[in-house]
């Protein structure tokens, strides 16, 4: 089949194929008088007409790539005249069967036409040209051998036509497979880019959470330090130190995350070492301590036996506590807030409840659900997205006696 594809012009350039075939046909026809035995053959001696017809038979291949049908008709006509003028032996005669270079040239032209043209033209070749050419060869054959000549030429040309269509079909299948592979590659590339964009969006959300929380802490700590500067300089100094440390931590987190966002190579994106470590439920006590340094009174409690959590659920639990405490600092100021983590075995779940008593001076710092719900646009919305991603539930709202509650349940089943 490789040889067939090469002959059809798929393995090598069609122009080279056609020129090579033309030279091969011309040389074979020139050598025919030297090959055919002289005894028993009533053949004409080669002359100028013979040379011209042989040249015409070969020249048809040189232009086959551009005009397959015209080239086929020229080759077939020249071969027919050569046989009709007795320059070449009959296909079937007293000497037996003789399939010479001219017959093979016509069969090759039929093969190339079947390869290079569509169904309509190739069907016309099989339904019209092959029967007419076979009938012509039968009429040129001696009496008593015409039926055999008809069958021989018909079988030869139909076989060439069938091989041509087979080569055409295999080439189409190969091209379709290549196109399908290219489409799959494009789809894979698109999916990889989408995954990268999704990951970057997630990192951007993490960046927002970290910056919003730490900046809120720094603002509250700065305000508190300013208020106690004159009364208790030592406390003010502690608060200034806390602001400095929080700022340093924020810059460190920013650098880590921006390093990931700047990474462009696919291999670097897939490298887990490039991903900054994410906080877990175990980091909640440290978070609570950092919030207490701002003057917020936090009552932290844990009940039940801790269970194993996926990394995503760990991060979700931590961010819920972080976002709730940040909202309390923003909207309630220094107040009492209770953080309770409740583990349960039957069913397996983690319940997180953060409730505050509201601002100490309700008039100037009144808070409502709309403010908390929208704020910067990422507060409760971000919580709901995280809870939904891990299959949990979230309830938020004001308390009847004042204050605000965030109640989240993470299903661990």
Image: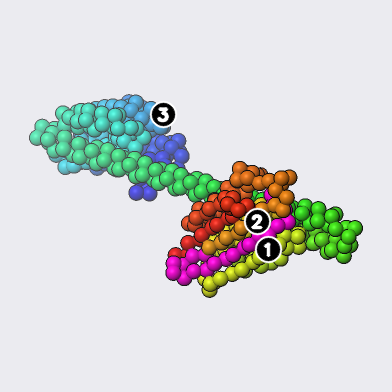
Tell me the crowding category of disc 1: few under 14, some 14 to 19, or many 20 or more residues within 10 angstroms, Cα based.
Answer: many
Point out the frontmost of discs 3 and 1. 1
Tell me the crowding category of disc 2: few under 14, some 14 to 19, or many 20 or more residues within 10 angstroms, Cα based.
Answer: some
- Whether pointer 2 and pointer 1 mark residues with C-beta atoms closer than 8 Å, the reply is no
Question: Can you give x and y, in whole percent of width and height, for residue 193 in the image?
Answer: 56, 48
As for residue 336 lying within the magenta part, the answer is yes
Residue at mark 3 to residue at mark 2: CA–CA distance: 89 Å
Magenta stretch: give its range.
330-350
Point out the frontmost of discs 3 and 2. 2
Closer to us: 196 or 31: 196
Quarter of the view holding residue 76 = top left
The tag earlier along the polypeptide, 2 or 1, is 1
Q: Which residue is mark 2?
A: 357
Quarter of the view holding residue 57 = top left
Q: Which residue is mark 1?
A: 298
- Which residue sits at x=71%, y=62%? 297
The tag earlier along the polypeptide, 3 or 2, is 3
Residue at mark 2 to residue at mark 1: CA–CA distance: 11 Å
- Which residue sits at x=23%, y=38%? 158
Secondary structure beneath label 3: loop
Quarter of the view holding residue 129 = top left
Q: Is residue 136 visible?
A: yes
Residue 66 got which mark?
A: 3
Question: Can you give x and y, in whole percent of width and height, for residue 356 in the image?
Answer: 64, 57
Q: Is residue 283 above or below residue 383?
A: below
- Which residue sits at x=80%, y=62%? 242
- Whether pointer 3 and pointer 1 mark residues with C-beta atoms closer than 8 Å, the reply is no
Closer to us: 199 or 112: 199
- Whether pointer 3 and pointer 2 mark residues with C-beta atoms closer than 8 Å, the reply is no
Question: Can you give x and y, in whole percent of width and height, for residue 35 in the image?
Answer: 29, 43
Question: Can you give x and y, in whole percent of width and height, for residue 33 in the image?
Answer: 30, 38
Tell me the crowding category of disc 3: few under 14, some 14 to 19, or many 20 or more residues within 10 angstroms, Cα based.
Answer: few
């Amino acid at each position: 089949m490789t040889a067939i594809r090469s002959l059809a012009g798929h393995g090598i350039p069609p122009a080279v194929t056609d020129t090579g075939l033309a030279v091969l046909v011309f040389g074979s026809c020139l050598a025919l008088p030297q090959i055919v035995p002289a005894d028993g053959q009533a053949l004409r001696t080669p002359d100028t007409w013979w040379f011209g017809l042989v040249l015409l038979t070969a020249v048809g291949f040189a232009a086959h790539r551009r005009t397959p049908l015209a080239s086929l008709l020229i080759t077939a006509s020249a071969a027919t005249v050569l046989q009709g003028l007795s320059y070449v032996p009959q296909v079937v005669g007293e000497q037996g069967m003789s399939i010479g270079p001219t017959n093979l040239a016509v069969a090759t032209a039929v093969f190339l036409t079947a390869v290079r043209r569509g169904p309509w033209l190739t069907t016309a070749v099989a339904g019209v040209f092959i029967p007419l050419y076979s009938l012509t060869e039968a009429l040129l054959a001696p009496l008593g051998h015409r039926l055999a000549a008809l069958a021989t030429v018909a079988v030869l040309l139909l076989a060439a036509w069938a091989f041509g269509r087979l080569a055409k079909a295999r080439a189409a299948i190969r091209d379709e497979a290549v196109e399908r592979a290219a489409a799959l590659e494009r789809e894979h590339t698109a999916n990889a880019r989408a995954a990268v964009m999704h990951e970057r969006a997630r990192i951007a959300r993490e960046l927002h959470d970290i910056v919003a929380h730490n900046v809120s802490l720094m603002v509250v700590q700065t305000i508190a330090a300013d208020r106690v500067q004159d009364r208790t300089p030592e406390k003010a100094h502690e608060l200034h130190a806390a602001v400095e440390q929080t700022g340093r931590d924020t810059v460190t987190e920013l650098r880590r995350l921006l390093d990931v966002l700047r990474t462009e190579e696919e291999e670097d994106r897939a490298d887990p070492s490039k991903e900054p470590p994410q906080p877990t439920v175990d980091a909640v006590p440290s978070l609570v301590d950092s919030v207490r340094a701002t003057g917020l009174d936090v009552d932290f409690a844990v009940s039940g036996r801790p269970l194993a959590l996926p990394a995503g659920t760990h991060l979700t639990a931590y961010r819920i506590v972080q976002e709730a405490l940040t909202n309390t600092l923003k909207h309630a100021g220094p107040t009492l807030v209770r953080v309770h983590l409740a583990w349960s075995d039957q069913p397996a779940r983690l319940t997180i409840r953060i409730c505050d008593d509201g601002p100490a001076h309700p008039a100037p710092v009144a808070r409502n659900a709309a403010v908390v719900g929208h704020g910067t646009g990422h507060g409760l919305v971000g919580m709901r997205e995280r809870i939904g991603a891990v299959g949990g539930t979230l309830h938020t709202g004001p308390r009847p006696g004042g204050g605000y509650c965030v109640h989240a349940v993470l299903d661990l089943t």
